[in-house]
Image (spheres, rainbow, N blue to C red):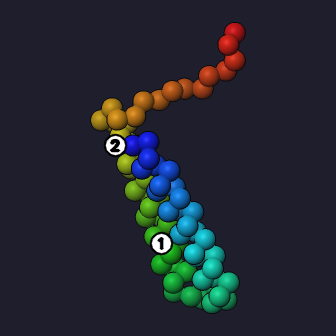
Amino acid sequence: MKWIIPIVLLMIVGSLGSALYYMMKGKGSSPKMVYSLMFRIGLSLLLFIGILLAYYFGLIQPTGIRVGSN
C-alpha cells in the first residue's frame, strides 16, 4: 500500500499534464484532452475507493495529527 498510493498519484498528475499538452496543441477542442481528463477522474475515484477499502480491511491505519511534544 505504501507504494501504490504514490504511483497512482503520479499517474494522476501525468494524466493532468497530458491533458494540458493536448489542450495547448489542439486549442482546447481535442478529444484526447477529454479522454485524458476522464482517465484522471477515474484514477482519482479508484484511489479514493482503494484507500477506503484499505482502511476498512485494516491495511492502513490513521496516524492523526501530532502537535508538538507538550
Q: Earlier in the sequence, mark 1 or mark 2?
A: 1
Query: Quadrant location of the C terminus?
Result: top right
Query: Is residue 49 positioned above or below 21 on the image?
Result: above
Residue drawn at 67 percent across, 13 percent down: 69
| Quarter occupied by the N terminus | top left
Q: Position of residue 11 (x, y in %)?
A: 50, 62
Left or right of residue 60, residue 15 in this image: right
Dot 2 lies on which element?
helix
Question: Residue reaching furthest left?
Answer: 57
Front residue of 14 and 40:
14
Task: Find the residue positioned furthest to the front.
Answer: 3
Q: What element carries label 1?
A: helix
10, above or below 59, in the image: below
Mark 1: which amino acid? Met
Regarding residue 22, the answer to whether it shows in the image is yes
Q: In this view, does 19 lie to the left or right of 8?
A: right
Are the residues at dot 1 and dot 2 in contact (C-beta closer than 8 Å)?
A: no
Q: Residue at coordinates 50% horizontally, 75% vertically from top-left?
A: 36
* Residue 48 visible in the picture: no
Q: What label sits on residue 53 in the rendered view?
A: 2
Q: Horizontal and vertical percent for residue 8?
A: 46, 56
* Image-quadrant location for residue 29: bottom right
Report the Cα–Cα distance between label 1 and label 2: 22 Å
Q: Which amino acid does label 2 sit on?
A: Leu
Tell me the quarter of the picture where residue 68 sits: top right
- Residue at image position (61%, 71%) is 17
- Pinpoint residue 18: horizontal percent, then vertical percent: 57, 75
| Res. 49 mark | none
Find disc 1 in the rendering and name its residue: 38
Classed neighbour count for the residue bearing mark 2: other residues with Cα under 10 Å, few (<14), some (14–19), many (≥20): few
